[in-house]
Image: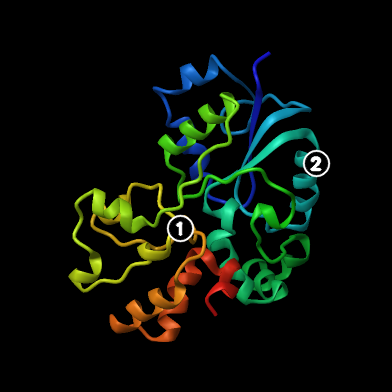
Amino acid sequence: MKPKVAVFDFTCCEGCELQILNCEEELPELLSALEIVEFREAMTGKASYYDIAFIDGACSRQSEIARLKDIRKRAKMVIPIGTCACLGGVNCLKNNYTMDELLRSEYGESAKYHDTIPARPISAVIPVDFYIPGCPIVKKEFIRVVQEILAGRIPHQYNNPVCAECKMAGNVCVFDKGMTCLGPVTRGGCEATCITGGGVCWGCRGLVDEPNINSEKLILEQAGLSVEDIVKKFDLFNIYQEHVWK
């Protein structure tokens, strides 16, 4: 029988799920090898068991904790996709405030009807088996991971920094342009898309294993950033892991 695959959404913009649906050319071949049994953005069906459960979005409500635990019980393999699910992402910026303060500012007198907790990545709630980072995920990487799983292999996790891909793309270093970047400590796999497009790396794919944070701080300080500026750069996508550099 074909492996059963489900895709779930939690607190996010659902852009990573759209990336899956954007794999127009590759989907027919994938669907010949697996069966999608639950995916709210694409179908209405539901299932009680999944060989692979892809999860998009962070956990930011008390009710989501029970839902995640239920998915974990039903799934043979759980894979967070995207920065929100893998790292907590921008959702975790709200953790700088009290939840009561956030609810009152957003909903006023109706705050008591809403549920929110400090945002966290999926791995902070349930065990996970692999990660596909990115904001959004890279289609090519998603396809590769699925193919490796279907072939019975442990998927390869890219660990070189974005800088390596920047050099391969022939980009001029943004620091030489008077800009600043988190590429030296950010996990690659995105083919340096943002820098190639004229931007900088904001660290959406998370830190590489054993990042040289002190060296990155020094580079940013030499570029004129204050300690506060540096922390803000790291915090945009990685605030849940802030203890790494503070």
Kind of residue at disc 1: Cys
Image x and y of residue 182, in percent: 38, 66
Residue named by callout 1 = 204
| Residues packed near mark 1 inside 10 Å, few (<14), some (14 to 19) or many (20 plus) | many
Residue named by callout 2 = 70
Q: Residue at point 47% right, 55% down?
A: 205
User: Dividing the picture into quarters, in which one does residue 71 lie?
Assistant: top right
Image x and y of residue 8, in percent: 64, 39
How many numbered discs? 2
Residue 99 position (above or below residue 171): below
**Residue 185 located left or right of residue 99:** left
Quadrant into which the N terminus falls: top right
Q: Residue 7 bears which disc, if any? A: none
Q: Residue at point 54% right, 37% down?
A: 155
Image x and y of residue 31, in percent: 54, 18
Residue 233 position (above or below residue 53): below
| Residues packed near mark 2 inside 10 Å, few (<14), some (14 to 19) or many (20 plus) | few
Q: Are marks 1 and 2 in contact (CB under 8 Å)?
A: no
**Residue 56 located left or right of residue 110:** left
Kind of residue at disc 2: Asp
Q: Residue at point 81% right, 49% down?
A: 66
Of the image marks 1 and 2, the number of the one nearer the N terminus: 2
Residue 20 position (above or below residue 174): above
Quadrant into which the C terminus falls: bottom right
